[in-house]
Image: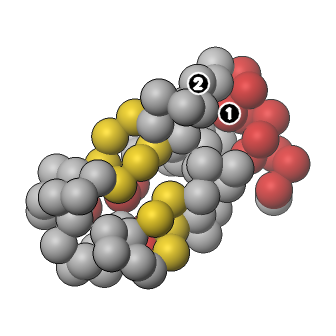
């Protein structure tokens, strides 16, 4: 499942540099490209953006439900 940044985002820019898939873009709020987001599956043990977000505004994107295997394949396809 891809992640989503909600309206609680403070645009602090902490999330963007830690994304291994370069899925996060500046905006108000910041935006996660669901076609590039793998929740860091394939690169890290847990979503790095959620770890560094001081606003706790990164949540599951209900429109992009994917299994762990699907996320691994998506990651492999990008790298």
Q: Position of residue 68 (x, y in %)?
A: 62, 23
Q: Earlier in the sequence, mark 1 or mark 2?
A: 2
Image: 57 above or below 14: above
Distance between the alpha carbons at the discs numbered 1 and 2: 10 Å
Q: Residues within 10 Å of mark 1 (few under 14, many from 20)?
A: many
Quadrant location of the N terminus?
top right
Q: Position of residue 2 (x, y in %)?
A: 54, 40
- Given this view, does label 1 or label 2 mark the residue nearer the observer? 2
Q: Is label 1 in contact with label 2 (beta carbons under 8 Å)?
A: no
Q: Does residue 45 show up?
A: no
* Residue at (22% x, 79% y) in the render: 12
Tell me residue 47's x, y (percent): 41, 46
For the C terminus, give its image quadrant.
bottom right
Residue 65 circle label: 2
Residue 5 in which image quadrant? bottom left
The quadrant in which residue 53 appears is bottom left
Residue at image location 47% in from the left, 28% down from the top: 62
The structure residue drawn at horizontal position 72% and vertical position 22%, both measured from the top left corner, is 69
- Label 2 packing within 10 angstroms: few (<14), some (14-19), many (20+): some
Q: Is residue 6 left or right of residue 60?
A: left
Q: Secondary structure at mark 1?
A: helix
Decide if residue 74 is in sight here.
Answer: yes
Q: Is residue 68 left or right of residue 51?
A: right
Q: Where 32 falls versus 24 (above or below)?
A: above
At horizontal 53% and vertical 47% (from top left) the residue drawn is 40
Q: Position of residue 25 (x, y in %)?
A: 50, 75
Which residue matches tag 1? 71
Foreground residue among 56 and 64: 64
Label 2 SS: loop
């Amino acid at each position: 499942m891809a992640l989503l940044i909600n309206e609680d985002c403070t645009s602090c820019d902490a999330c963007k540099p830690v994304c291994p898939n370069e899925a996060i873009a500046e905006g108000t709020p910041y935006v996660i490209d669901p076609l590039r987001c793998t929740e860091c599956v394939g690169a890290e043990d847990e979503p790095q953006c959620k770890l560094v977000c001081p606003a706790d505004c990164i949540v599951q994107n209900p429109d992009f439900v994917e299994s762990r295997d699907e996320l691994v394949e998506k990651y492999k396809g990008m790298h």
